């Protein structure tokens, strides 16, 4: 009798405790993910010795340990009219200057040849200062020179998702205006983040085209004068894919969706961009 009562009492107590426990359980609400705060400008500085450079103090073929080439035609996504080659006619060094030349000649199915040079080996950076001293082609309408950057690996997907940094672009139908543009998934093409500066002597004198790239911002400078800033808002890769390695490209396109938008002159070539030096400086991490 006592054992039975004790058993019943214990069972009732256990049921009461379990019931109380269940009634006090708090069900979790929806998961809230707080994005990381936007980066703060830490006023990063840059090393004073380049980690990659070419002063072009030699003659002949560009240094093959530093430069490769994108080759071929097909429009390159911009309806361009040239065929890019690795010919000495299209890219050569003389008198301490690199010459990138677009020529009126038939190569493959194209009526124009040119060069699109690509930095290789240690010619890349993830944050740093990149600068080039260049003189742009004085050419009738139809030429489109550029000094620009693309990612080594398309971590966030194909263009424009993984980003592009245009340090300098010029179209010869508007020869005195020089453009700095950043492309990403949020804004690209004609709607990219862009700034334009007039340089009255861009085709007759050498000018410095530079980008300072940090986790906080991409800043453009022409002749060391600030003319563009694009700030990382901390919103993710759609608007900031610029946390990966990028390399440099230098080329002259003929025609294309922008370069040829006002037509292409029959005497557009030869069109030559001259580059006195290219230098990469690493950012000093804090």
Image (cartoon, grey):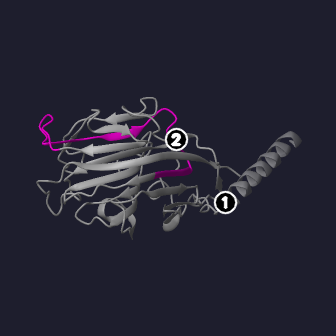
Pinpoint residue 4: horizontal percent, then vertical percent.
Answer: 82, 41
Residue at 88% over, 42% down: 2
Magenta stretch: includes residue 129: yes
| Mark 2 → mark 1, Cα distance in angstroms | 62 Å
Q: SS of the residue at dot 1? A: loop
Mark number, residue 26: 1
In the image, residue 175 sits, relative to residue 241, either above or below, namely: below
Check disc 2 and report the residue beneath it: 53
Q: Position of residue 106 (x, y in %)?
A: 12, 38
Which one is nearer the viewer's eye here, 4 or 286? 286
* Residue extent of the magenta highlight: 104-132
Q: Is residue 157 shown left or right of residue 211?
A: left
Q: Which of the marked residues, 2 or 1, is nearer the chain's N terminus?
A: 1
**Total number of numbered labels?**
2
Q: Nearer the viewer, residue 273 or 165?
A: 273
Residue 246 coordinates in the image, percent (x, y): 47, 44
């Amino acid at each position: 009798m006592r054992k039975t009562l004790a058993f019943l009492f214990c069972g009732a107590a256990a049921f009461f405790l379990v019931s109380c426990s269940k009634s006090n359980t708090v069900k979790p609400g929806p998961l809230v993910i707080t994005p990381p705060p936007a980066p703060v400008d830490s006023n990063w500085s840059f090393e004073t010795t380049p980690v990659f450079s070419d002063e072009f103090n030699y003659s002949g073929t560009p240094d093959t340990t530093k430069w490769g080439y994108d080759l071929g035609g097909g429009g390159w996504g911009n309806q361009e009219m040239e065929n890019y080659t690795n010919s000495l006619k299209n890219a050569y060094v003389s008198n301490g200057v690199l010459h990138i030349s677009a020529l009126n000649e038939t190569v493959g199915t194209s009526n124009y040849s040119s060069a699109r040079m690509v930095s290789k080996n240690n010619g890349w950076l993830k944050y740093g200062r990149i600068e080039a001293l260049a003189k742009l082609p004085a050419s009738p309408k139809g030429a489109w020179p550029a000094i620009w950057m693309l990612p080594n690996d398309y971590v966030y997907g194909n263009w424009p998702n993984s980003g592009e940094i245009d340090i300098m672009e010029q179209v010869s139908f508007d020869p005195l205006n020089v453009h700095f543009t950043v492309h990403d998934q949020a804004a690209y093409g004609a709607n990219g983040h862009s700034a334009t500066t007039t340089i009255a002597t861009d085709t007759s004198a050498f000018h410095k085209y530079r980008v300072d790239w940090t986790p906080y911002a991409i800043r453009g400078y022409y002749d060391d004068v600030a003319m563009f800033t694009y700030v990382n808002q901390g919103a993710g890769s759609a608007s900031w894919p610029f946390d990966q390695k990028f390399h440099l490209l230098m080329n002259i396109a003929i025609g294309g969706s922008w370069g040829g938008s006002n037509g292409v002159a029959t005497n557009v070539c030869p069109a030559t961009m001259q580059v006195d030096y290219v230098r990469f400086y690493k950012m000093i991490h804090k």
